[in-house]
Amino acid sequence: MTLTQKDIQQLKEKMAEGYLPQWVLTDPDIFRLEQEKIFARTWHFLGHESELKEPGSYVTRWIVNDPVLLVRTQTGQIKAFLNSCSHRGVRLCTEDFGNKRAFTCPYHGWTYDLDGNLIGIVAGNKVFGQNVNKEAWGLRPIPRLASYQGMIFANLDPNAMSLEEYLGDMKWYLDIILGRSDGGMEVRGVPHRWIAKGNWKMTSENFAADPYHVQMTHRSTVEMGITPKDPLYASYGHQVVLGNGHGINVITTESGQSPNPFQGTPEAMWPMFERNLSPAQLQVFRNATVLVGGVYPNLSFISSVNGSEEYKYNHVNFRVWRPLGPDRMEIWVWFMIDRAFPESYKEKSYQAFLRTFGASGTLEQDDTENWARIVEASGGIMARDKSLSYNNVLNYLMGFGNLEPDANFPGPGVAYPTTYTDAVARSMHEFWLDLMTRE
Ligand code: FES
Ligand SMILES: [Fe+2]
């Protein structure tokens, strides 16, 4: 399947006007093409180095439909393989995580070591002949693997640009979260995961580009006193367009200062932040109540501190929207905390996370409901009509042509002086079309 010249022309025209045709959300052909053109060519978050504590540690993950076995080898290296036996293709390891010296296939018993070498074939010489060539039948490595600040990413495209180049200006903002503390971050517990209705483009957009939804969707948190009453409270700050579809919202307060400096982290940690971050990064971190953003295509994150006493703990989570189709996804959420923080704070932070984000969190459930409703209402004749005769385009006009970037913002990227704008969403769609139409 490809996009026809007519489709491409229409998409370009509509995006240039600040619209998105609704049919791109639920069209199964579009989803097939996205797997090939987007998910097979961009960098995917697989996990954090702290999840692989010692030699033999492993976790199993997915890049959309490709199962991945991520292991720490005897020499401490991290490697990633297609989690599929080279003999007949069986999914080799089905546990979520563990520690092993070798992986034995449940079907015919072929065994692989931590480097993916085939080290055992049941009755090998007898049935495959004297010169059975084990070297040729090891596990198939994922073509590219790279880490940034402990975050492990993979890419199915052997010719992809480097991870650092792909992340670009996003690194500056990720460093505020991942690089502020000595020893970096660690994952606490295991990633939460559950299946929900939704389209990955909309969930990615929700984090990278949409603080506008907060006042309505998360109204219950206002009523509970977790978030402020001012309907504009999530608009104060900047939305920053970062290129390659990445974006972030640096949310602060009307005065530009946070009542909880450095997101309510323990004061004893602040000198450490001052050592590890630049003055401009410190300025952003000191005044932000929320940092919420996305690494294209489907990694999102939020570092937040909420208002009321029992919630005044910074909590950070990273999440992958693993598409299972155009209208369904598996949500994976990693809670992360600075290794250097006191244990008591880590536990409080984890509890604040559980109450807000994660499968049972209040804010999470608010959002999930809307993502389901988008796909529920986008699959019919009117919404999917490609000729747009029902005017089935979505509105991305906020801040379109009536908002100038703020040249005084201290961080890189194109920063707009409010988060109530569709600037990042529009740049995500442009990058989407760029990837979808590349040869
Ligand atoms: S499929 Fe794995 S040993 Fe045969
Ligand atoms: Fe939300």
Image (cartoon, grey):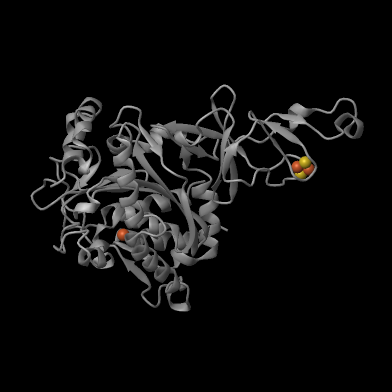
Quick one: which residue is furthest to the left in this view?
255
Asked whether 75 or 161 is in front, the reply is 75
Please state if 40 lies on the left or on the right of 312 as rendered. right
Q: Quadrant of ligand 2?
A: bottom left
Name the side, left or right, on which 36 lies relative to 392: right
The reply, left or right, for residue 215 in relation to residue 1 is: left
Residue extending farthest to the front is 344
Q: Is residue 287 above or below residue 220?
A: above
49 up-or-down from 373: above or below: above
Pinpoint residue 138: horizontal percent, then vertical percent: 71, 32
* Residue in the foreground of this view, choosing between 24 and 137: 137
From the top left corner, tell me how far across and down residue 131 is, in percent.
86, 25
Relative to residue 371, is residue 101 drawn left or right? Answer: right
**Whether residue 344 is visible:** yes
Decide if residue 427 is in sight here.
no
For the residue pair 63 and 190, the one nearer the viewer reads as: 190
Residue 394, quarter of picture: bottom left
Report the residue at 16% width, 41% height from top.
261
Instruction: Quadrant for the N terminus, please.
Output: bottom right
Q: Nearer the viewer, residue 309 or 27?
A: 309
For image coordinates 68% across by 43% down, the residue present is 92
Residue 97 rendering spot, x and y as whole percentages: 56, 42
